[in-house]
Image (cartoon, rainbow, N blue to C red):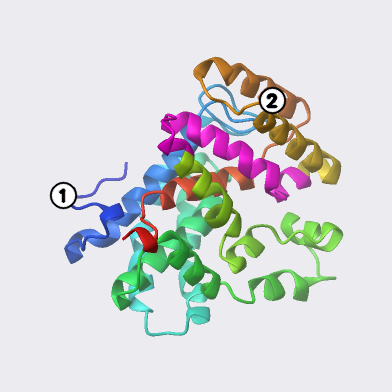
Amino acid sequence: MFTMPLAPQGAHIACQEKLPQAYRSRYYARLAYRAMQTEARLTPKPGLVDGRNSGAHQDMALPDFLRSASAIARDLPLFVEEGAASAARDPDAVLDRLKPIGLRCETAMLRATGGVNTHKGAIFILGLFCAAIGRHEATGQAISPAALAATVGAFCQGIVERELVELRGLTPLTAGQRLFITLGFTGARGEAQAGYPLVIDTALPRYRQLRGEGLSEELALLNTLLLIMSHNDDTCVASRGGIKGLRWLQRQAQLLLNVGEIRSPANLSLLQQFDELCISRNLSPGGSADLLMLTWFLSHFHNEESQ
């Protein structure tokens, strides 16, 4: 279980108040841990593991995700600390310094789940953003969603070229590399290199708008998930259902948004029906789930213009 000392009363990330040094890395890591838990517990999620079922998965269930999140959380402060320690280095030199921590988290995940990959994408995203936070803390830069995403993009400059383009013709290829070759999808690497525009420009503003309109966190997240699914060329979906499966899922998500979104618990049956259709087609939008997790995480930081 992930434990940490509580931050002093009144300290809050969204207020951009400085925390005592002893608390900082664990405070941000705790938020990242909560992001993993929040995404995992959100129900119902079409095709995804949640509190209702295992979605389109045969090898994992919600308890696996919760154990995995707890195991990973122990090492998340290391990303913040490395981000601060490497603050004087060029941004594109940081990624290689984060990889050993990421591998350590993956090992903990696999040990906790008996070899099942529950959070590899989450480790990649949260590791990058925790490192960006550490860098910004060390340099005095703004800790806002857009500023952090720009730094993550700088960390990942060239990753598409190095890990996708230059590996054409090599074997064995990962699923992401195969989809880049066949469909041109850059997946998680492309999102990171671009600074997560789908989250910063689309998902996060909409989530905040929905919360401002009085929707519960759960309903706002479910609607934001549909929005992400309708836009995202999710390689998790394409690897299972090809381009036809992906376009079908995007259309279905957009249809639910077009009929008025999920505005009350009474509308949840629409998502449950969508879930059953995804399961029957063996489609699971894991990449979109990771972007939803990031949206929730970044929602706890003010935009620069609001500070």
Give the magenta-colored segment's residue range.
Answer: 210-239
The spot of residue 251 in percent (x, y) is: 77, 36
Please rate how many residues cluster around mark 2, counting C-alpha atoms within 10 Å: few if below 14, some from 14 to 19, many from 20.
many
| Residue on which the image places disc 2 | 274
Observer-nearest residue: 281 or 58? Answer: 281
Q: Residue, x 30% and y 53% (percent of image)?
A: 14
In the figure, 285 relative to 136: above or below?
Answer: above
SS type, badge 1: loop
Please name the amino acid that badge 2 sits on: Phe
- Tell whether 30 sits left or right of 287: left
Residue closer to the observer: 64 or 237: 237
Residue drawn at x 69%, y 75% as measured from the top left: 162
Tally of numbered discs: 2
Q: Residues within 10 Å of mark 1 (few under 14, many from 20)?
A: few
Q: Is residue 79 visible?
A: no
Q: Are marks 2 and 1 in contact (CB under 8 Å)?
A: no
Q: Is residue 237 magenta?
A: yes
Quarter of the N terminus within the rendering = top left
User: In the image, which disc is placed on residue 10?
Assistant: 1
User: What kind of secondary structure does the magenta stretch mostly adopt?
Assistant: helix
What's under tag 1, amino acid-wise? Gly
241 up-or-down from 104: above or below? above
Q: Position of residue 167 (x, y in %)?
A: 77, 72
Q: What x and y, as percent, mark residue 124? A: 53, 59
150 lies left or right of 240? left
- Tell me the SS state at disc 2: helix
Q: Magenta stretch: residue 78 in it?
A: no
